Image (cartoon, grey):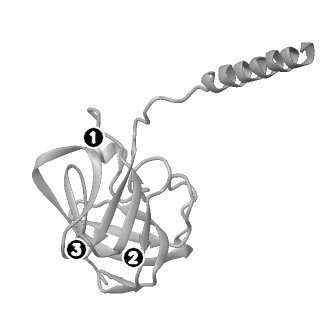
Amino acid sequence: MKTSKLLSMLAFTMVMLFAVNANAQKFPGLDKSPMDEALYRADRNAPPLAKVIYSRPQLRGRSLSSLAPNGKVWRTGANEATEITFYKDATIGGKSVKAGTYTIFTIPGEKEWTIIINSVVNTWGAFSYDQSKDVVRVMAPASMANDSVEAFAITFTKDGTMHLGWGKVRVAVPISF
């Protein structure tokens, strides 16, 4: 009986130690630039054709031009560089891109933005951007909207156009499959 009681106490002690350790784990608060996803499907029940994973920086009283300056390569979001996956071969601005996962970089401009599809993935920011790894570069018109978007956003319309919006700037990138 003594051995059985000792084993029970030992088992109870181990369970308590694991429970205390499990509850001691610290988790960070919400990211200031939360990660989001934009998915494009030809219709609601169709398989996806493209998926963009990006982080959403916020203006927080700052100017867009200070966060994504005109004429400089930008990671098209925050934190890790924005990635796009094409599940089928695609055409962007009239240029072909094979199915696969790529990084999206942009060069903002006043009237148009350069949209860059680059073969390097899993990279943080645009600090190690390598132009020699560009798959496609296209120009996309930039316009000004009446309303302002606080957090950078990417969405697709039914025709496959990818839209970037931040502050009052809107950029439309035609994509077809």
In the visual, does 101 lie left or right of 62?
A: right
Of marks 3 and 1, which one's residue comes earlier in the chain? Answer: 3
Vertical side of 139 occupied by 144: above or below: above
The label number, if any, that marks residue 86 in the structure image: none
Return the residue nearer the eye: 146 or 24.
Answer: 24
Location of residue 30 by image quarter: top left
Residue 132 location in percent, x, y?
56, 75
Residue at 35% across, 69% down: 115
Of marks 2 and 1, which one's residue comes earlier in the chain? Answer: 1
Contact, mark 2 vs mark 3 (Cβ under 8 Å): no
Q: Regarding mark 2 in the picture, which secondary structure is present there?
A: strand
User: Mark 1, residues whose alpha carbon is within 10 Å: few (<14), some, or many (≥20)?
Assistant: few
**Disc 2 versus disc 1: distance between alpha carbons?**
26 Å
Location of residue 116 by image quarter: bottom left
Residue 126 location in percent, x, y?
50, 56
User: Mark 2, residues whose alpha carbon is within 10 Å: few (<14), some, or many (≥20)?
Assistant: some
Residue at 70% across, 19% down: 16
Q: Quadrant of the C terminus?
A: bottom left
Three-letter code for the amino acid on which mark 3 is drawn:
Asp
Vertical side of 140 occupied by 38: above or below: above
Q: Regarding mark 1 in the picture, which secondary structure is present there?
A: loop
Residue at 84% across, 14% down: 5
Q: Which residue carries the number 1 mark?
A: 63
Three-letter code for the amino acid on which mark 1 is drawn:
Ser
Frontmost of labels 2 and 3 is 3
Return the residue nearer the eye: 132 or 76.
Answer: 76
Vertical side of 56 occupied by 99: above or below: below
Q: Which residue carries the number 2 mark?
A: 137
Q: Quadrant of the N terminus?
A: top right
Three-letter code for the amino acid on which mark 2 is drawn:
Arg
Q: Regarding mark 3 in the picture, which secondary structure is present there?
A: loop
